[in-house]
Image: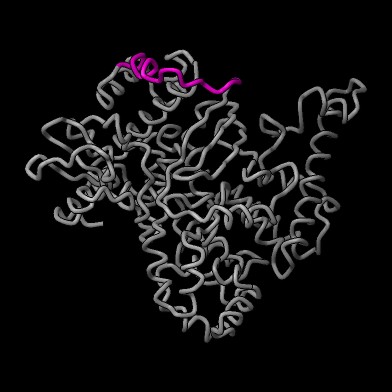
């Protein structure tokens, strides 16, 4: 979004929630910055500046508004469309790459020098990578202060700060309060019980069609990894520093998230992955407005506004699901995936029993340790990793040889680094490398571009369910004709794909 003063000021004057996260409003007379929908009195024009990021506002010496909490606004949907270096960098920063690997690690992942990366992000976001990561650390620290009873020193290091002094200075600068004052302001809010348990709200731009999201995830849920119960989606997570489990409940105005983490340093990447999974940074008003111009889709858009594209918390997991799901039903793919995970769990238990050499049975070891290796707190575990898949015997796959070898080829490519399936991947390059692997064709690569890499403009025109949905709506149902027709849906063809699936 261009920083056009009149357009931004109109959004602030009308308190339009659709623009939350697109930009931030700095009020020079009060020294604070807000989200556009802040309920406070609209500031005078001469006292207003607009910033493309919270980090840019902080760099101008402004502190976060305590009333509208701008750091908790949805992220900008702009990067889904552009998918440029700045967008990739923002996704990697959100996933904690700067905290783990520093700016050199981020620059290396993106293929640029640190200096050039700083210049690009400063031009686009008004702040360099260190400042953007610092803003995220401040938000993570505030969440931990308000939702846990951890000591401040523990929070400082869990949030990614290098020292307690840096932690104190940053929070005073960003929130104009000492960390202890933020906890006092929590008042009677009860911190969640249990070590490593954090409850927070994940903001989104309305509308959100929660039932469509949960229905999609429910029919694909893998036992022991994920489940949908009573309007809540539960799943285990593999995170950079350990395991975790999340419960996500869509409610009016936000998604209630309860996270249980083995290592609190994983809070920021866990939140980023949950937001990505539910597509919470999308702009449904813009998407639906484009799709509704097609008379064939208009009734569905009016009946079900706010349809999102369910994405992924782990690129490798989504790639395995896509390969196994080639030319089979969702139910059949789910059965095969469950068999694969069961074989992995048994192999891990057998390995540990051999290692202990004390006569303990596999079931006893499982019971003593509270679950299988890699299992998250609470019983759900993350999906198996690439190295673990390579360790499985032929008998553990339960699928044709060609598909089994396609999975192994993918896993080897991920392990040796020739294929990157992370959030900040270059989408076009990732698709090109995937297509070079045996057993991966255009449908699989494009399915991953849509769900794992977050490309909003993918039409799976060869997909049988998409073709059936097109026919049901009276649209062309052969791939070439549907591709031509779908040009009018750009840049939101991924959302049209979801609607065609629902029509089928």
Q: Is residue 135 left or right of residue 191?
A: left
Q: Nearer the viewer, residue 37 or 260?
A: 37
Q: Residue at position x 27%, y 37% from top?
A: 55
Inspect the magenta stretch and tell me whether residue 183 lies in it. yes
Q: Is residue 208 above or below residue 64?
A: below
Residue 114 inside the magenta-drawn segment: no
* Quadrant housing the N terminus: bottom left
Main SS of the magenta part reads loop
Colour logic: one colour
Say left or right for 60 vs 422.
left
Can you give x and y, in whole percent of width and height, for residue 36 in the image? 26, 45
- Who is closer to the viewer here, 8 or 337? 8
Image position, residue 480 (x, y; %):
53, 85
Residue in the image at 31% along x and 39% along y: 129
The image quadrant of residue 500 is bottom right
Q: Is residue 142 above or below residue 331?
A: above
Outermost right residue = 359
- Percent x, y of residue 92: 43, 44
144 or 153, nearer to the observer: 144
Task: Give residue 90's position: percent from left, percent from top.
Answer: 37, 46
State the image quarter where residue 136 is shown: top left
Q: Quadrant of the C terminus?
A: bottom right
Q: Is residue 235 above or below residue 77?
A: above
Q: Which residues are magenta?
A: 178-195
Which residue is at the far left? 46
Res 368 → quadrant? top right
Residue at 54% of width from left, 62% of height from top? Answer: 433
Q: How many marks?
A: 0
Could you tell whether 487 is left or right of 402 in the image? left
């Amino acid at each position: 979004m261009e920083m056009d003063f009149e357009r931004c000021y109109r959004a602030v004057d009308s308190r339009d929630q659709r623009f939350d996260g697109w930009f931030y409003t700095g009020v020079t007379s009060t020294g604070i910055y807000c989200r556009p929908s802040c309920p406070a009195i609209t500031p005078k024009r001469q006292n207003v500046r607009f910033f493309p990021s919270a980090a840019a506002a902080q760099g101008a010496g402004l502190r976060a508004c305590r009333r509208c909490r701008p750091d908790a606004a949805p992220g900008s949907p702009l990067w889904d469309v552009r998918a440029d270096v700045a967008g990739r960098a923002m996704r990697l920063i959100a996933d904690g790459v700067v905290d783990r690997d520093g700016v050199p690690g981020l620059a290396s992942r993106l293929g640029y020098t640190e200096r050039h990366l700083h210049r690009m992000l400063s031009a686009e976001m008004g702040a360099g990578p260190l400042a953007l990561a610092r803003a995220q650390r401040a938000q993570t620290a505030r969440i931990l202060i308000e939702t846990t009873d951890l000591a401040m020193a523990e929070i400082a290091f869990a949030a990614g700060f290098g020292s307690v002094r840096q932690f104190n200075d940053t929070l005073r600068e960003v929130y104009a309060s000492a960390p202890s004052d933020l906890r006092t302001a929590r008042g009677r809010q009860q911190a969640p019980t249990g070590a490593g348990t954090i409850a927070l709200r994940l903001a989104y731009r309305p509308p959100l069609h929660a039932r469509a999201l949960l229905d999609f995830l429910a029919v694909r849920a893998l036992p022991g990894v994920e489940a949908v119960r009573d309007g809540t989606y539960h799943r285990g997570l593999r995170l950079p520093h350990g395991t975790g489990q999340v419960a996500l409940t869509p409610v009016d105005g936000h998604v209630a998230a309860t996270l249980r983490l083995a290592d609190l340093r994983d809070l920021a990447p866990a939140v980023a992955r949950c937001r990505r999974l539910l597509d919470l940074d999308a702009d449904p008003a813009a998407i639906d407005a484009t799709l509704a111009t097609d008379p064939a889709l208009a009734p569905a858009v009016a009946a079900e506004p706010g349809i999102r594209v369910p994405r992924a918390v782990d690129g490798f997991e989504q790639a395995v699901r896509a390969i196994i799901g080639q030319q089979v039903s969702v139910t059949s793919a789910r059965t095969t995936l469950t068999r694969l995970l069961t074989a992995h769990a048994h192999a891990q238990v057998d390995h540990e029993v051999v290692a202990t050499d004390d006569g303990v049975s596999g079931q006893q070891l499982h019971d003593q340790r509270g679950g299988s290796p890699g299992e998250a707190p609470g019983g759900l575990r993350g999906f198996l990793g690439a190295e673990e898949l390579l360790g499985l015997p032929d008998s553990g796959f339960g699928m044709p040889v060609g598909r089994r070898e396609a999975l192994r080829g993918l896993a080897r490519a991920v392990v040796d680094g020739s294929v990157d399936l992370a959030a900040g991947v270059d989408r076009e390059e990732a698709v090109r490398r995937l297509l070079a692997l045996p057993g991966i064709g255009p449908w699989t690569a494009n399915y991953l571009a849509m769900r794992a890499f977050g490309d909003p403009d993918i039409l799976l025109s060869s997909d049988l369910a998409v073709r059936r949905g097109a026919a049901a709506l009276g649209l062309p149902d052969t791939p070439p004709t549907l591709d031509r027709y779908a040009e009018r849906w750009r840049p939101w063809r991924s959302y049209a794909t979801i609607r065609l699936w629902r029509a089928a």
